Image (cartoon, helix red, strand yellow):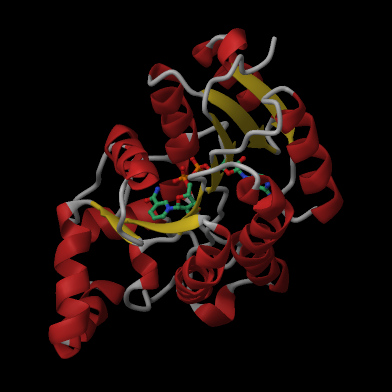
Amino acid sequence: MGADGRKAIFITGAASGIGLATAKRFAREGWYVGLADIDAGGLKAAREALGAGNCGVHRLDVRDRAAWKKELAAFTKGTNGRLDVLLNNAGVAHYGWFEDLTDDEVDRQIDINIKGVVNGARAGLDLLIGTPGSVLINVASCAGLFGAPKMAIYSATKFAVKGLSEALDLEFSRHGVAVRCIMPWFVDTPILQAGSQGSNEKIADTIRQGGSEVYTVEEAADVIWKAAQGKDLHWIVGKAGKRLRFAARFMPGAVRKQLLSMMDPV
Ligand code: NAI
């Protein structure tokens, strides 16, 4: 069964967390959803949750350029060529001091979080151009607003996604394609359990020590839903993120001090 004229969104990292919640939200709003992920079991569960008639399932590693072309072609075969939103959401984190990450952990974050997003934008552009009013949405992070200790590589990848989104929003305006960048504060998903081989600590430990706010996946999905219809380029998830954006701009010294005190609490 195909999209039947419904609006169509293709979501990477759709088997879990923010991607899955966003898939459910768009399906509830009457959209047809392409669920893409490397997690076959998670995809199967996601398909059941959405209802088979509301989605197509795509095994896709965002690092694989050829697979991107193949899966987008398969998805849009069922949507009559339509791609209203491409959501580059898949991402990974490794947590720990810069020198304690393995080379593989460094590469994995750069390859998935940056190159995966670039691959998606390049593979999807023609389909987006062919769909009036289309939007490319990239998920960055509040770690792309101010460099976060023990997440240096992750932060760097999210600064890259933010910069890429800003540049592409300008470039793609030539084609009538809008670009939106989502910057969530901490959201309650399995990524908060991310650690690294060189550290026993997880992101969740720092959140607990720092007493930070954590938002729900539904709140993140709501922001993405609004971003798909809205005019702004940058979309923050969570009040704590909005406070950070303000502080990073107008009092970066205070942000630095706070991050230093959170780094190694005694
Ligand atoms: P999650 O771990 O729940 O979901 C990530 C999904 O991406 C998983 O289903 C995973 O299988 C998939 N994935 C991983 N590598 C992949 C690959 N190579 N190809 C295709 N799929 C792949 O994490 P969450 O939190 O839902 O993350 C979604 C996005 O939100 C990520 O880009 C993350 O960096 C970003 N984000 C998350 C925050 C949080 O606190 N949860 C905060 C800020 C940004």
Name which quarter of the figure residue 34 lies in.
top right
Above or below for 6 versus 160: above
Q: Is residue 130 above or below residue 113?
A: above
223 shown above or below 258:
above
x, y percent for residue 60: 74, 40
| Front-most of residues 180 and 64 | 180
The structure residue drawn at horizontal position 47% and vertical position 56%, both measured from the top left corner, is: 178
Picture coordinates of residue 233 (x, y %)?
Answer: 35, 62
In which quadrant of the rendered image does the C terminus lie?
A: bottom left
Percent from the top left, x then y, of residue 164? Answer: 53, 71
Task: Name, please, the residue furthest toward the bottom.
Answer: 253
130 vs 20, nearest the viewer:
130
Count of marks overlaid on the render: 0
Is residue 264 among what the camera can see?
no
Instruction: Classify residue 142 by image quadrant.
Output: bottom left
Looking at the image, which residue is at 45% across and 36% down? 17
> Is residue 224 shown above or below 5?
below
**Which x, y percent locates residue 57?**
69, 24
Residue 77 appears anywhere in the view:
yes
Depth check, front residue: 156 or 226: 226
For the point 44% across and 18% down, which residue is it? 30
Which quadrant holds the N terminus?
Answer: top right
Q: Residue at x 43, y 59 (%)?
A: 201
Q: Is residue 92 left or right of residue 120?
A: left
The answer to whether residue 67 is left or right of residue 186 is: right
